[in-house]
Image (cartoon, grey):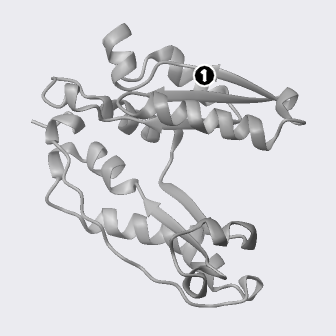
Amino acid sequence: MKKIVVLAGDGIGPEIMDSALAVLKAACPDHLQCFHFDQRPFGGAALALTGEPLPQETLQACQQADAILLGAIGDPAWENAPITPEKGLLNLRQALGLYANIRPIKVVDAVIALSPIKEAILRGTDFVIVRELTVVSILAKKQKNLKKPTTSIIIIKQRFDGFCVKPLRSPARGRSGFSLSIKQMCWRLADFGAD
């Protein structure tokens, strides 16, 4: 049996999670006995219960799980709090060594008619968005040295060359192109424990 830790989070997270679990149960009714869903507090919900956005028990459950199903965090109610839900997400990524979100997008012919997008544009859509997460983790480790991004860039390049660039260029995928875009995010230095 595979253990899936369910982190609904806060804000719209619980609503998203209810729908995600309903879809999973509808899509895999014959395989549900293969999964054990372990719901744990996380983000703002955990802050309200324990004062911590990532309680130790939740982290331990995630470390022992086969998979983690995450809803959302970032309820505006916690925006000016001394500890925010995002701190839990940063700690989770760092503790588990996570450095990318993988978001595959492939449209199957059976659902094309349900889309408001023209069939000629939609048919054959098949790509993967890989969102890099390491800048935040690296900045967290370099609290006192935030003005030297060179190391961060090298680590990101090495991870992405091995993780997504080389596989995307492989002949097995049937195509060799990829696009790279850079997204800059601003995080409160307080989320890193920086002075």
Foreground pick, 20 / 6: 20
Residue visible at 43% across and 72% down in the picture: 157
Taking depth in this image into account, of 110 and 32 the one nearest to the observer is 110
Q: Position of residue 119 (x, y in %)?
A: 60, 82
Image x and y of residue 26, in percent:
76, 38
Q: Is residue 149 left or right of residue 133?
A: left
Image quadrant containing the C terminus: top left
- Name the residue: 72% across, 82% down: 173
Residue 137, percent across and down? Answer: 35, 47
Residue at mark 1: 61
Q: Is residue 95 visible?
A: no
| Residue at the spot 57% in from the left edge and 21% down from the top edge | 60
Q: Residues within 10 Å of mark 1 (few under 14, many from 20)?
A: some
- Determine whether 73 is above or below 98 in the image: above
Q: Residue 169 vs residue 180: left or right?
A: right
Q: Residue at x 71, y 39 (%)?
A: 24
Q: How many marks?
A: 1
Dividing the picture into quadrants, the one containing residue 33 is top right
Residue 122 position, x and y percent, is: 58, 79
80 vs 192: above or below: above
Q: Secondary structure at mark 1?
A: helix
- State which quadrant residue 4 falls in: top right
Q: What is the residue that sits farthest to the right in this orientation? A: 30
**Residue 58 visible in the displayed image:** yes
Inspect the image, locate mark 1, and give the three-letter code of the amino acid beneath it.
Answer: Ala
Residue at the farthest top position? 49
In this view, the residue farthest toward the left is 195
| Residue 75, image quadrant | top left
* In the displayed structure image, the side of residue 161 where residue 182 appears, left or right: left
Image quarter hosting the N terminus: top right
